Image (spheres, helix red, strand yellow):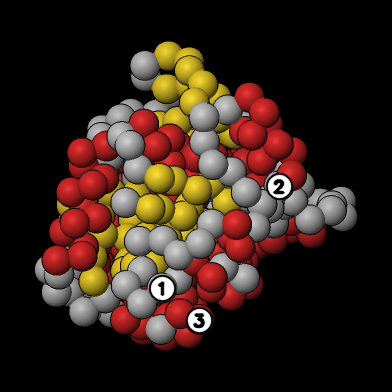
Amino acid sequence: MKICVLGAGALGCAIGSVLTEDGHEVWLVNRGQAHVDAMRQHGLRVRDHNGDRSMAVRAPTQAAEVGVVDLVVVLVKSFHTRQAMASALSVVGPHTAVLSLQNGLGHEDVLADVVGRQHVLAGKTYAGGVLLGPGHILAGTQGKETFIGELDGQISERVQRIAAAFNHAGLATTVSDNILGTMWDKLLVNVATGALSGITRLAYGELYAVPEVEACAVAAVAEAMAVAQAAGIRLATTQAQQAWAKAAEGLPASFKASMLQSLEKGSVTEVDYVNGAVVRWGAKHGVPTPVNQALVACIKGIERALPPVKTKGD
């Protein structure tokens, strides 16, 4: 397959690396010039369960270099979705599938507005990545589940074909006929650790050693589960503790949640699409969400204190 990873930061490069190694024509699009220059000059350097290695990759800063593809994997920051997809319309042909694997809720509607709902697939992945430096990532894909599906729940030929390609590359991928429930299950994992990692500035090894952090995380997840139940969402998660445990499965102690990575780069986070989504859905369905409201407030305060930065790649 010809695949464009739109927003090839840490996670995009982690996914793109295994697809590249499996023989797919993968284009890693990122706005960050230093990151792209490093990949072009030295290859993408990957550290994972197999050790360290470098591989040649296709890495432009603009999607215009790519041409029409079979699949677009969207991994830009949530607040860049509309702008990024609108600037990448040249990669979308009549039969191109556009798959969001972003954190949080609401991206599929934004993408549908830009490219048409018939092109859009929804998905969630538990894979992770950390940017160690320009063109250098720590990848956490081994044994981490990915779920993809049609917005209407149909098991289509195209979604099965994409899942087969991902599985062959080593990305454990399942086709879901309940993608909204799947997205909420992934949201619960992000709710558990994202904001708390950003607030405490702790990597997972230290984060999981603080009982008070765990108690707060479980309370935030329990709120989100109550909201989902009120909204009629069918969850696979049955206990809040499961999301807390799942968030760290297969990841090294040095792993940092994406919100913490964003703050360390001086960038705002995706909290509005994670804990903020719980608060909005809670208000809509009459479910109180004080823990998630507090986490959003703390992250917003930290973001407010960030110094102004120049535009960087996702």
Q: Which mark is residue 114?
A: 3
**Is residue 168 left or right of 1 when viewed as pictured?**
left
- Mark 3 to mark 2 CA distance (whole Å): 23 Å
Camera-nearest label, 1 or 3? 1
Image check: 219 left or right of 38?
Answer: left
User: The residue under label 3 is which amino acid type?
Assistant: Val
Q: Nearer the viewer, mark 1 or mark 2?
A: 1
Residue highlighted by disc 2:
32
Expressed as whole percent of the image width and height from the top left, the position of residue 59 reads: 59, 43
**Residue drawn at (48%, 85%) of the image:** 113
In the foreground, 296 or 140: 140
- Disc on the earlier residue, 1 or 3: 1
Report the Cα–Cα distance between label 1 and label 2: 26 Å
* Pointer 3 or 2: first along the chain: 2
Q: Amino acid at mark 1?
A: Gly
Tell me the crowding category of disc 3: few under 14, some 14 to 19, or many 20 or more residues within 10 angstroms, Cα based. Answer: some
Q: Position of residue 123 (x, y in %)?
A: 32, 60
Task: Identify the residue shown where x is 62% and y is 49%.
Answer: 60
Q: Could you say whether the residue bearing mark 2 is in a helix, strand or loop?
A: loop
Of the numbered discs 1 and 2, the one sitting upstream in the chain is: 2
Residue 127 seen from this side: no
The relative height of residue 179 versus residue 306 in the rendered view (above or below) is below
- Number of other residues with Cα within 10 Å of mark 2, as a class: few under 14, some 14 to 19, many 20 or more: some
- Residue pointed to by mark 1: 93
Given the current orientation, which residue lies at the most extreme top position?
51
In the rendered image, residue 194, in percent from the top left (x then y), is placed at 51, 48
Q: Amino acid at mark 2?
A: Gly
Residue at image coords 45%, 31%: 139
